[in-house]
Image: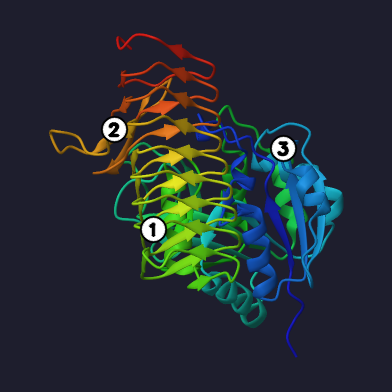
Amino acid sequence: MSKKIPLFIVLAGGQGQRFAPLVTNKTIFPFMDKPLLFWQLKQLQRVGVKNVLIATNSQNHAYLEKLKIKGLTIQTKRQSQPLGMADALLHLTKEIGNQPVVIMNAVDVVSDDLFKTLIQEIETSQPQGLVTGIKVKEYFPGGYLQLQGSQVTGVIEKPQPGQEQSDLVNLVFHYFSQPQKFIKLLKQTSSQDDDVYEQALTQLMQQENFGFISYDGYWGKLKYPHFVLDVMQLFLTHRLQTKINPSAQISDQAVIEGQVFITENVKVEAGAVIKGPAYIGPNTIIGNHALIRQSMIERDVIVGFGSEVTRSYIGPKCMLHHNFIGDSVLEAEVNPSFGTVTTNWRLDKKTVQLKTLTANVKTNKEKLGAILAKRVFCGVNCSFMPGVTVGADARIYPHLVINQALPANATLKSSQN
C-alpha cells in the first residue's frame, strides 16, 4: 500500500525585483490565458498531490484564495513582507506542523516526471530528506549543490561565475520528513546575504542522510524578464495542444501550419500566416497578411495588417500596427504604433545584454529584442535596439531610436537617450 503523499508547500510570496521592468507578479504572469501558478497547481493535481499550502503575497493572494481545482485542497497564507524563502517557511510553521513536506518554488517549470520521481523516491526509500539538482552547461545565477564524492553536502547560493562547487544547480524541490528540525535551524541562522534557507539546509544535510535526485528533463524559471521567452517556449514545446476552437473565424485564404492552438472567438483574416508552435488567445484578431511564428499571443490582442511576430510573447490587450516584433516581450496593453520595430540581433553578432536601469545583464542569447512593460505607448516608426527594457506607462515620441533602458512613466522626446 502506497504511503501518503506529503504536503506540498509552494513558495509564492516573493516580490520578484529582478523581474523588472515587468510589473505583473511573476507567479501570476499569464501563459496561455492562465496565471503561471494555475498551471503549477494543475500539474500537482495531475501527478497525484492532494494537499497544497501556499505562501502568498499581496498581488496573488486574492486570486489564489478563490482558486478551486478539483481533487486539490489549497490552503493559503499571506506573507506579510517579501523577506525570502526562510521567512516564508517560518511564517507557515504552525500550518506545517510535524507532517512531511515537499518545498517548491512557484516559478520553476519542470516536467511531470520530476514530481513522479520525487514521490516514488519518498515512498520507496523513505529518506530523511531529498534535494534535487540539474546539470547546466553555462552559468546560472542561482544556488549550486556542493558535492563530496557522490554525496551532496550543501547548497552554495549564487557563487561567482567560475567558483561553482559543481555543475549542478539546486532546484527547490526539497523533501523533509521532519520539517520542524529544518525550521529550528532556520530560526537559529542569520546572514547578511539572502541565503538563510541555503545555510540552514546545508547544516541539516551535514546532520542527516539526505538523498539526491538528478533531474535531466526540461526546466525554465521566471527570474529575469527575458526568461519569459524561455518559459513561453517550454509551454509551446511541451504543453501545447493542436486545436482550433469552433467559434474561431479562419479565412479560407489564411495559412496555419504546424502545432497551433487557436482559442475561442479568434479572427484570422485573409493572407495571415500562423506557423507553429503558436498559441492564439481568446478574442484576438490576426489581421491581413500578418505573420506569427513560434509565439504566444494572449487574449484580446490585435495583430494588425502586415505585422510580424517571431518567437515573442504578446500579452493581453496589446495592439500591433504593421510592426516587427522579434524575440521580445510585450507585457500587456502595449501600443507600438505603425512602423515601430524591435531589433533582435547585434551588428557585431555578439550575444545580447539585457539593458536595465541598474545594470547590463548577460543573457548568452544571440537574439533578444525588447522588453516593454504594461501600457508602453510608442509613436510611429520607433526602433528598439537589442536587449532594451522600458518601464510601465512610458511614452516614446515618433521616429526615435531607443538604445538604453527607460524607467516607468518616462516620456522620451529626443533620440539622445
Between discs 2 and 1, the one toward the N terminus: 1
Q: Is residue 39 left or right of residue 237?
A: right
Residues 127 and 136: in front is 136
- Label 1 Cα neighbours within 10 Å, binned few <14 / some 14-19 / many ≥20: some
Estimate the x, y position of residue 20 in percent, counting from the top left: 51, 30
Q: Report the residue marked by disc 2.
A: 386
Q: Residue most toward the left?
A: 348
**Amino acid of disc 1:** Ala
In front of the other: 388 or 173: 388
Q: Residue furthest bottom?
A: 1
The residue identified by callout 3 is 59
Rendered image: mark on residue 270: 1
Q: Are marks 3 and 1 in contact (CB under 8 Å)?
A: no
Query: Which of 172/302 is in front?
Result: 302
- Disc 3 element: loop
Tell me if label 2 and label 1 are in contact, CB under 8 Å.
no
Residue in the image at 74% along x and 57% along y: 179
Residue 247 in picture, x, y percent from top left:
60, 66
- Examine the rendering and report whether any part of residue 387 can be seen: no
Q: Amino acid at mark 3?
A: Gln
Q: Which residue does the image show at 39% across and 21% down from the upper left?
A: 405
Q: What is the three-letter code of the residue carrying label 2?
A: Pro
Question: In terms of depth relative to the viewer, which is nearer, 339 or 316?
Answer: 339
What is the x, y in percent for residue 314? 47, 45
